[in-house]
Image (cartoon, helix red, strand yellow):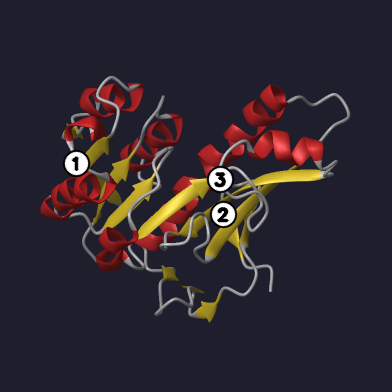
C-alpha cells in the first residue's frame, strides 16, 4: 500500500499538526503531507509546515464574495494536491456542506469534547459548567453536520476539583497529540475504513468509539 497523502487545514498554532508531522517523520504514520492550508496567512501552523518542507496555502476569506466561494477555492486546491486524506487540525471555520461531498470518508477532525457532548466552541468551559467528572477529545469523520460525523476514537481525562478552563485544555491537549496520529495511522494502514458511513476497525463496525491505551494503540471497546 502506498504512503497516505495527507492534507491539513489549520487556523492557529498548529500543535496537532506538529504531532502529525512528527508521527510521519518517525514512521508511526505511513504517510506524507502534500499540503497545509489555512484561512489565516500568519498562523503558526503554516510556519510549522513550511519548516517541515510541506507546501502551504493561505486564502483570505475577505477576498471572496461569500463562504461558499471561499470554500470552493480552498477545496479545489486541496483536490489538486492529490491528498488521500484531509485532516482538520484546529481549523476554525464552518465549511460549506457542498464542498465536503467528494471528501466523504476522506476527512477527519479532532474535537476537544466527548462527542456528541459539546459540539462547537468553548467545550472545556461547558464541561466544567455541567459539573462533568470526565472530559476528553474525539476524532470523527467529517460530514456536513458540525462536529456530527461518525466518531472513530476518544481519549478521556478526569476533571479535578481545582481544574479551570485553561488547565483542562492544557491537560487534554497532550492526549489529542496522541489520539489524532493514532487514528490517522490506522486510516493509513487500512485498519479504519469509511464503509459507506459505517466506519470499521479491523473489519468490525465501530459501534463504540475506540480508546487509546498507554502505548498509543487503539483498542476496540466492543
Q: Quadrant of residue 57?
A: top left
Image: 182 above or below 165:
below
For disc 1, the neighbor class at 10 Å (few under 14, some 14 to 19, many from 20) is: few
Label annotation for residue 65? 1
Q: In this view, does 11 lie to the left or right of 164?
A: left
Secondary structure of residue under mark 3: loop
Q: Quadrant of residue 164?
A: top right
State the CA–CA distance, disc 3 to disc 1.
25 Å
Image: 69 above or below 60:
below
| Residue depth check, mark 3 versus mark 1: number of the one nearer the observer | 1
Residue position marked by numbered label 3 in the rendering:
120
**Front-most of 93 and 149?**
93
State the CA–CA distance, disc 2 to disc 1.
45 Å
Residue position marked by numbered label 2 in the rendering:
217
User: Tag 1 or tag 2, which sits nearer the N-term?
Assistant: 1
User: Tag 2 or tag 3, which sits nearer the N-term?
Assistant: 3
Secondary structure of residue under mark 1: loop
Image: 45 above or below 213:
above
Residue 29 x, y percent position in the rendering: 37, 49
Q: Residue at x 70, y 30 (%)?
A: 168
Q: Residue at x 53, y 42 (%)?
A: 178
Label annotation for residue 19? none
Q: Is residue 116 left or right of residue 161?
A: left
User: Tag 1 or tag 3, which sits nearer the N-term?
Assistant: 1
Q: In which quarter of the image is residue 47?
A: top left
Residue 79 x, y percent position in the rendering: 16, 55
For disc 2, the neighbor class at 10 Å (few under 14, some 14 to 19, many from 20) is: some
Secondary structure of residue under mark 2: loop
State the CA–CA distance, disc 3 to disc 2.
27 Å
**Badges 3 and 1: C-beta atoms under 8 Å apart?**
no
Amino acid at each position: 500500500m502506498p504512503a497516505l497523502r495527507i492534507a491539513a487545514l489549520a487556523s492557529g498554532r498548529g500543535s496537532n499538526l506538529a504531532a502529525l508531522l512528527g508521527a510521519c517523520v518517525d514512521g508511526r504514520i505511513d504517510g506524507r503531507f502534500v499540503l497545509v492550508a489555512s484561512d489565516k496567512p500568519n498562523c503558526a501552523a503554516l510556519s510549522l509546515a513550511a519548516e517541515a518542507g510541506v507546501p502551504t496555502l493561505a486564502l483570505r476569506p475577505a477576498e471572496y464574495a461569500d463562504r461558499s466561494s471561499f470554500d470552493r477555492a480552498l477545496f479545489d486546491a486541496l483536490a489538486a494536491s492529490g491528498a488521500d486524506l484531509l485532516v482538520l487540525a484546529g481549523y476554525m471555520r464552518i465549511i460549506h456542506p457542498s464542498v465536503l461531498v467528494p471528501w466523504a470518508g476522506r476527512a477527519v477532525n479532532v474535537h476537544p469534547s466527548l462527542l456528541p457532548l459539546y459540539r462547537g466552541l468553548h467545550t472545556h468551559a461547558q464541561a466544567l459548567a455541567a459539573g462533568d467528572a470526565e472530559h476528553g477529545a474525539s476524532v470523527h469523520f467529517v460530514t456536513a453536520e458540525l462536529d456530527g460525523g461518525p466518531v472513530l476514537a476518544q481519549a478521556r481525562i478526569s476533571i479535578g476539583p481545582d481544574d479551570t478552563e485553561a488547565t483542562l485544555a492544557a491537560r487534554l491537549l497532550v492526549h489529542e497529540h496522541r489520539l489524532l496520529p493514532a487514528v490517522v495511522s490506522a486510516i493509513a494502514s487500512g485498519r479504519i475504513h469509511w464503509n459507506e458511513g459505517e466506519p470499521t476497525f479491523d473489519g468490525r463496525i465501530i459501534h463504540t468509539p475506540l480508546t487509546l491505551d498507554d502505548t498509543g494503540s487503539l483498542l476496540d471497546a466492543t
